[in-house]
Image (cartoon, grey):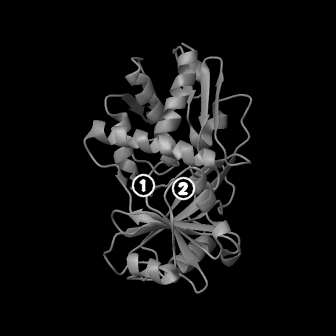
């Protein structure tokens, strides 16, 4: 979010410096990795419209960078009732979607659906190549890595934008109401070589946990359980929760034929979440706060960067 904001401000003719406390490509936050999910499918129309805005922003960034940042092989929502899916909201926004029966999903995609379930396909979904996206946002920006900022008052700037993720409340007062959790992310090698769509299932069949998976450019599949990790302090080093890794592994094995049933790799990712999973974008004098995360923020980065830049311009 910080790099997207910096790019928007730079394009508006402003001088921008980005400070990052860790090294490039670090795994301590919420933006690392090769891929992040992109989807239009949400149950609420306002999120769909924001994703549409972000999609246009990603396409603009691709054209500017001269490389592909989005790989859209579709999203399959695995459900037992249409009301569990995002179909109604997609329909309300005029977004194309398809209901696919179990056999049709398995014919078109390298997936296996449980008996009694079917798929809802939204084609404009897949992944953002996250590492490439960060590099594209940062191109031409003065980014200073390994610099810890203790307080916005330490910076001689007309406006300070705080997009510190799990560390946001170390930098602002009064604090914002967010909860930090350490989520587990697992990687798997599918047996086939067909393009892998993003896929998700939730509801009673998964014990109320939302499991999701997306393509990974190296191993093939990246999977996780959404908002299932323990609450932590951001400075605490930690490893993936073993129980979550087992649950994710069992879910992936149910839906995809794998080369090896065990994960190739397991990592962690910090979520910084508000009570309603919405984003906090606000200006406090010369300080702009962007806590645009809640475990589903990366896809919206171009749109959120534009909004935070607009708030920053108000302080100039």
Mark 1 and mark 2: span between their CA atoms?
10 Å
Q: Residue, x 48% and y 82% (percent of image)?
A: 112
Which residue matches tag 2? Answer: 269
* Mark 1: few/some/many CA within 10 Å (<14, 14-19, 20+): some
The quadrant holding residue 311 is top right
The quadrant holding residue 218 is bottom left
In the image, residue 310 sits, relative to residue 261, either above or below, namely above
Which numbered disc, 1 or 2, marks the residue that appears first in the sequence?
A: 1
Q: Residue, x 72% and y 48% (percent of image)?
A: 276
Estimate the x, y position of residue 11 in percent, counting from the top left.
Answer: 38, 24
Estimate the x, y position of residue 157 in percent, counting from the top left.
Answer: 51, 15
Q: Residue, x 39% and y 69% (percent of image)?
A: 196
Q: Residue furthest bottom?
A: 115
Left or right of 50: which side holds 34? left
Q: Residue furthest left?
A: 66
Which residue matches tag 1? Answer: 33
What is the secondary structure assignment of the residue under circle 1?
loop
Q: Are marks 1 and 2 in contact (CB under 8 Å)?
A: yes
Foreground pick, 105 / 17: 105
Q: Residue, x 57% and y 16% (percent of image)?
A: 314
The quadrant holding residue 245 is bottom right
Foreground pick, 142 / 97: 97
């Amino acid at each position: 979010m910080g790099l997207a904001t910096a790019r928007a401000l730079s394009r508006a003719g402003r001088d921008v410096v980005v400070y990052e406390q860790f090294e490039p490509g670090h795994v301590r936050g919420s933006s690392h990795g090769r891929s992040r999910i992109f989807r239009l499918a949400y149950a609420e129309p306002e999120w769909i419209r924001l994703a549409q805005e972000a999609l246009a922003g990603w396409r603009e960034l691709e054209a500017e960078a001269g490389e592909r940042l989005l790989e859209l092989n579709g999203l399959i929502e695995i459900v037992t009732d249409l009301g569990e899916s995002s179909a109604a909201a997609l329909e309300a926004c005029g977004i194309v979607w398809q209901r696919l029966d179990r056999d049709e999903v398995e014919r078109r995609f390298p997936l296996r659906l449980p008996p009694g379930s079917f798929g809802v396909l939204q084609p404009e979904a897949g992944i953002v190549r996250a590492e490439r996206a960060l590099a594209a946002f940062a191109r031409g920006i003065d980014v200073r890595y390994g610099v810890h900022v203790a307080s916005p008052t330490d910076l001689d700037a007309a406006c300070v934008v705080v997009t510190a993720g799990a560390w946001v409340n170390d930098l602002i007062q009064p604090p914002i109401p967010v909860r930090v959790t350490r989520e587990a992310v697992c990687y798997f090698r599918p047996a086939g070589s067909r393009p892998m769509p993003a896929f998700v299932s939730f509801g009673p069949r998964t014990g109320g946990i939302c499991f999701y998976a997306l393509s990974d450019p190296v191993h093939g599949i990246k999977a996780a359980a959404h908002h299932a990790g323990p609450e932590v302090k951001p400075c605490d080093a930690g490893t993936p929760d073993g129980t979550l890794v087992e649950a994710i592994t069992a879910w992936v094995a149910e839906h995809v034929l794998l080369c090896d049933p065990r994960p190739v790799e397991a990592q962690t990712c910090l979520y910084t979440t508000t009570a309603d999973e919405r984003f906090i974008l606000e200006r406090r004098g010369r300080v702009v706060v962007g806590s645009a995360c809640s475990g589903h923020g990366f896809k919206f980065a171009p749109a959120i960067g534009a909004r935070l830049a607009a708030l920053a311009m108000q302080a100039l």
